[in-house]
Image (cartoon, helix red, strand yellow):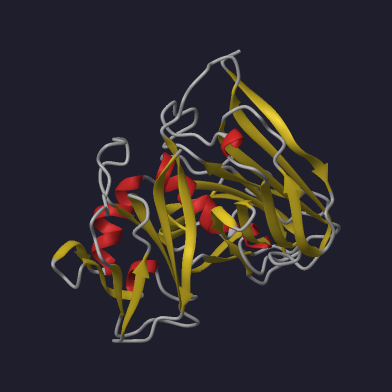
Amino acid sequence: MNYREVEIYAPKDIGTAGTEVIDINVSDVLSSIELIWQTTVATAALMTAPHVDCLTKVEVVDGSDALFSMSGKDAQALAFYANGRMPFNCISVKATEYMRSIIPIYFGRYPFDKQLALDPKKFKNLQLKITWDRDAANAGVTVNELTVRGWVFDQKAITPRGFLMSKDIRNYPPVANTYAYTDLPVDYPYRLLMIESYSTDKEPGEVLAVVKLSEDNDKRVPFDMTGPEIVDKLSVPAGEIEENFEGADDVTATDLYVTPTVATRPQAEVGTVAITAAGLWSQGTVTGNKVAWGDAVVAKYYGFVVRGFCPHHCLLIPLGDLKDLDDIQDVKGIGSLRLITQGAAAVGTSPNLKVITQQLRAS
């Protein structure tokens, strides 16, 4: 076989909260690592956050050298933007059923990229560190399960040029009409930047008035757009997200937390057990990543599909053709590289920004 799936961490209930350190005992070249996170509730329960919020930090490290570091939801969003396909989420708040999310870590531009992959033999002590809180999305969790698998090159011998190193390098609250400055590292070329532009009551593009990339104090400005422009011209064209939900509801609206955050459109699924009587549905409001969904009959089951754009409030800033390995932002010879953001006139409730970098790191 040219490619093979390997088990890095067998399915296990890892308890309520903490940090799990997992040795990556793989010798073959790694194309990707997949985290499979599953939780189950004993009785029907409401969501308080997206399911992947349970994984607050996901890291691949070699000693103190971080090769990948960000939250579970940002890892999902990055996988979507970097690869063009949304990782799988299957969300149910029905009693004894599960929520399951897959969080991929791609070391190449796409699965089994022959030019970019992670060679474990180049490192001394590769480890995966996962920080979690099983109740972050639903307080009624009784059982959880974490599984980690890797996809490797098996009988296909390759010599990758390097791998994609992705990190969350800054986390800060934006202030209305105020500039913030983030100095970016200039050690490796850039493939893309991603900004998690969060607010509980605004779409991600509405939080930012200006996003600007400046080299050597504006000697060269490779990027300068408003938040809405980034959504319309870069993030939305990256593709639409589709996600499935199931649950049980009372006559009061249930808050469900979804992945898309722009043009979010929930729609009842025809043919499911939910659609059994006229007037059953009473769709509530969509605010950020929260859908308030109620029914008109007590204790009915429901199912719906939600579609939209910009996963987990994240905005894409490509710094070249994402498919072309040679079309990247070379920072060789640059003295300083700075990301400049300005908060919008109204940044919304509980706003927060995260700056995520993806760089090409040579082997």
Q: Quadrant of residue 16?
A: bottom right
Query: Is 243 positioned to the left or the right of 344 in the image?
Result: right
Q: Which residue is drawn at the image coordinates 60% and 41% (left, top)? A: 123
In the depicted structure, whether residue 172 falls above or below residue 264 = below
Q: Which residue is drawn at the image coordinates 30% and 86% (left, top)? A: 178
Pick the quarter of the image with the N terminus.
top right
| Residue 279 seen in render | no
Nearer to the camera, 295 or 323: 323
Nearer to the camera, 213 or 239: 213
Q: Quadrant of residue 227?
A: bottom left
Q: Which residue is drawn at the image coordinates 79% and 60% (left, top)? A: 44
Query: Is 213 positioned to the left or the right of 173 in the image?
Result: left
Nearer to the camera, 72 or 339: 339
| Residue 251 seen in render | yes
Nearer to the camera, 302 or 46: 46
Query: Is 61 positioned to the left or the right of 226 in the image?
Result: right
Q: Which residue is drawn at the image coordinates 36% and 51% (left, top)? A: 188
Tell me how many marks there are: 0
In the depicted structure, whether residue 244 falls above or below residue 254 = above
Residue 303 in the image, given as x and y percentages of width and height: 63, 49
Q: Quadrant of residue 247?
A: bottom right
Judged from this view, the residue extending furthest toward the left is 219
Residue 350 in the image, given as x and y percentages of width and height: 50, 82
In the depicted structure, whether residue 204 falls above or below residue 107 = below
In the depicted structure, whether residue 231 falls above or below residue 307 = below
Residue 107 in the image, given as x and y percentages of width and height: 50, 40
